Image (tube, grey):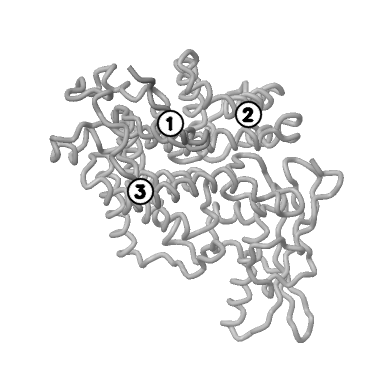
Amino acid sequence: MGRPRQDLNPAPPEALRRERLRRVLLQPVDGASLAAFRIGLGLVMFWQAMELLFGGLLELRFLSPLFHFKYYGFGWLEALPDGWMRVLIWIYAAACAGITLGWHYRLSAAVFTLLHAYQFLLDESLYNNHDYLIVLLGALLTVVPAHATFSLDARRRPGDSGWVPAWSLWLLRFQVAIPYVYGGLAKLDRDWLLRAQPMKIWLANPGPGEWRLEVFGEPWAAYFFSWSGMVLDLLAVPALLWRRTRPFAVAVVVAFHLLNSQLFEIGPFPWLMISATVLFLEPDWPRRVRILPPRRGPTPAALPASAGPRSLAAQAGAALLALHVALQLLLPFRHYLYPGDVDWTEEGGQFAWRMKLRDKRGDLQFVAVDPASRNAVVLTGVESVLTRKQRGMMRHDPDMIRQFAHWLAESFRERGRPGMEIRAVTSLSLNGLPAQPMIDPEVDLAALPGTLGPSDWIVPLRAGGAR
């Protein structure tokens, strides 16, 4: 017998590593875990849709306010009239139901994502990290086959195996991990760890409907919540992925989110994150606990690791997903492109998972200056056109103050007094530090355009308050 023929041109190590990664990502896994997450997300968001329609949220957020703060580049986006807005939310609710049931799943996920993004972008003062996360998860659901099993779509296609490629599970795990990891990194902060701020302020001053115990007033309580929150954010994902620590991690994460649902007014976020926790369990866990029937049909070993040659569409899709991953990894560092403390200036603070890190309290007054006489008048009561949520968020954000100054100047113009200068006199405290001006009181805010660049009219945080 002759010697076996050797490959004279072996593949380079990089190509072998890419092929190995490709096979791992395409390895079939049970779609049961994705189905459980799909149902949990759909139910949570259907409940949110009902809150909009019957709980007064639609009127409070979109219909009642006379003024809406705008994201940069989305000033053209407006809320529809009352009747049409309700029709839109009913369609949104139907899309949530479609996701839950797995009925016309991809269409339902696409409609859900577009309509949630529309709501998200209507008013910048409503910004929440969880709404941003919901938009991202909805977009990923349009490409992830979370309807492969336990769905009406799967019942119409009895020949489907119910297995899904491993990348679909890891992609959603990655997206859920991002808020934990970056939220924990952001808490590696002097105020959060050494001063337990702003936790001290919030525990001492609960908002409407927020629950407190007498023990929360103890000096150690704020430090306990601050440090434990940081540790949980940093360790939750590795503890959930490691099989030995997973049961304990699941119990702690669920308890943490249940406590947050009572301590803070943060809407569906705790329930969303509890639903997302199931993604870190074994892919077939719903079958192990008898929530879903045992699997029938071929085993993973009998299924191909890939679906044949990689088409141009598949390569384009993979490139888009890789771009999404890169953006999620890099975007939270955007605030380092701006000077000053991000918790003071707010520049680059959005989309960075900087959750519950700052509290600003103090005084804000708008002053109108007549361009001809140079007479200055303090405008009293003008914030009454805003909701409580809008007023609170505006005091945090210099650019929202600038936007409202534009609205005040336009109101003067409509009353026959064009060219009025609008200035802001501020005295605000960040996380209990000494109060100071946040905005240059000599600047006409109504003359300033919106920009993605740094704003030189924001007064830097004083050295005594630097962190």
Residue behind mark 2: 230
Residue behind mark 1: 7
Crowding around mark 3 (Cα neighbors within 10 Å: few <14, some 14 to 19, many 20+) is few
Numbered-mark total? 3
Above-or-below relation of 160 to 392: above
For the residue labelled by badge 1, is the local secondary structure a helix, a strand or a loop? loop
For the residue labelled by badge 3, is the local secondary structure a helix, a strand or a loop? helix
Q: Which amino acid does label 2 sit on?
A: Met
Name the residue nearer the viewer: 252 or 87. Answer: 252
Crowding around mark 2 (Cα neighbors within 10 Å: few <14, some 14 to 19, many 20+) is many
Badge nearest the viewer, 1 or 3: 1
Does the rendering let one see residue 329?
Answer: yes
Crowding around mark 1 (Cα neighbors within 10 Å: few <14, some 14 to 19, many 20+) is few
Q: Do the residues labelled 1 and 2 touch (CB within 8 Å)?
A: no
User: Could you say where residue 266 lies in the image, as x and y percent from the top left?
Assistant: 50, 40
Quadrant of residue 287 within the rendered picture: top left
Does the rendering let one see residue 361?
Answer: no
Seen at 70% across and 72% down, the residue is 422
Give the spatial CA distance, label 1 vs label 2.
53 Å
Q: Are marks 3 and 2 in contact (CB under 8 Å)?
A: no
Seen at 39% across and 36% down, the residue is 167
Q: Which amino acid does label 1 sit on?
A: Asp
Quadrant of residue 101 within the rendered picture: top left
Seen at 77% across and 75% down, the residue is 376
Above-or-below relation of 108 to 294: below
